Image (spheres, rainbow, N blue to C red):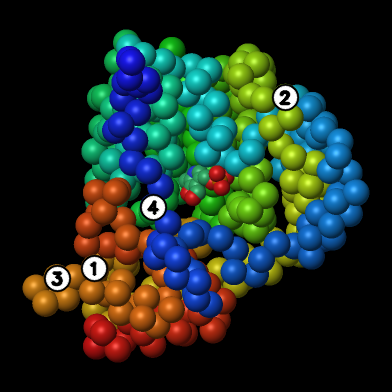
Amino acid sequence: MELLLPRPGLGQIKPYRPAQPLGEERPWIDLSLTVNPLGPSPKALAAYRNAAGQIHRYPDSRQESLRRAIARRYDLDATRIVCADGSDAMIQLFCQAYAGPGDEVLCHEHGYQGFLKAIRVSGATPVVAKERDMVADVDAMIDRAGERTKICFLANPNNPTGTYIPLEAVQRLRAGLPPHVLLVLDAAYAEFVRRNNYDCGVELVENTDNTAMVRTFSKMYGLAGLRVGWAYGPPAVVDALNHVRGAFNVSVPAQAAAIAAVTDVGHEEATYAHNSHWLPWLTHELEQLGVRVYPSVCNFILARIPADPSLGVQQVMDHLARCNILVRPTQDYGLPDCLRITVGSEEENRALVRALAEILA
Ligand SMILES: Cc1ncc(COP(=O)(O)O)c(C=O)c1O
């Protein structure tokens, strides 16, 4: 019998590895995933519960109310918005719509892993531009773009580095890329960044026909478990994404909760205030322990464990696990001596610092 083989290249995709050891059900302090420590907005929770009576129906395939709610919140044109079951799925839709075997898709060295997976699933070839000091390097990205490049992904700010490039650099990237390259700006953490020189790129999307933006409800809005992401793009790009996506790709409760979440400015402010307090606190406390922390504008930090032959990242993770704390190793991002640690609740942050002090001090 002939062997059934999946498409070539799929073997290069690294399967997702959860931080939690298999079968170990403990009350973990899970700082391994970049979620909102305050949870979802109570309004989103109520909308989710209210939607329970409607789950025998198919969701609104036009995503009308959700697109309008997003457009109102961010002052956007609702006809240029399209939603998906998470921004990872949206990144895959971009690759499906614009890239395939023989094409190249550009991303950056320590850039978000979802790009590589989506590129490989589409059959296209990833091209990875070097970064400079853990920050995307616009010149290196422009250098690596060529005739076969179809898409250029930029996570801004980026996961796991937590760093960003200013609007002026994003504009330079757009101007330097050939016009046939679709620039996709992944701004999953945009709601956490209030720096004068940062911008998620709305104007570029509106003023060019080859730039799009991807956003998510998983981070600031605390709806990671519901899977809602969205894209903002030129009409032709939105049309292409609508052709590729499943008609019912965002569930009834997910649409309902996302509409409530995006209108709950109070919860967003509380989350922002929490992060603004605990992100610098964590950074300071870890630096006191000799850990190098990269300057993050997100809801997590990237920590480089001090070089010590008797104490590596694995020993630190093992010790944290003994204290019931999970963090994310970053060797798959080419950062074998780092850990990504999400800002948790006050109690979780203090527990993390106590546990790290036991092993690093
Ligand atoms: C930069 C970036 N983009 C996209 C995603 C995917 O988020 P989701 O699929 O939950 O919307 C993540 C999640 O970690 C991320 O960090």
Q: Measure the C-alpha gap from mark 4 to mark 2.
A: 30 Å
Residue bearing mark 4: 17
For residue 236, above or below residue 56? above
The answer, for residue 151, to whether it is visible in the render is no
Q: Sort mark 4 into few (<14), some (14-19) or many (20+) by Cα contacts within 10 Å.
A: few
State the separation of the CA atoms marked 2 and 1. 44 Å
Q: Earlier in the sequence, mark 4 or mark 1?
A: 4
Q: Is 237 drawn above or below residue 204 in the view shown?
A: above
The answer to which image quadrant residue 150 occupies is top left
Q: Nearer the viewer, mark 1 or mark 3?
A: 1
- Contact between marks 1 and 3 (CB within 8 A): the answer is no
Label 2 vs 1, first from the N-terminus: 2
Q: CA distance from mark 3 to mark 4?
A: 25 Å
For the N terminus, which image quadrant? Answer: top left
Q: Position of residue 59 (x, y in %)?
A: 81, 34
Residue position marked by numbered label 2 in the rendering: 247
For the residues labelled 1 and 3, the Cα–Cα distance comes to: 9 Å
66 sits left or right of 337 in the view: right
Residue contact between numbered discs 2 and 1, judged by CB atoms under 8 Å: no
Q: Amino acid at mark 2?
A: Ala
Rendering coords of residue 89 (x, y %): 56, 35
Residue highlighted by disc 3: 307
Q: Nearer the viewer, residue 323 or 278?
A: 323
Residue at figure coordinates x 56%, y 17% from the top left: 209
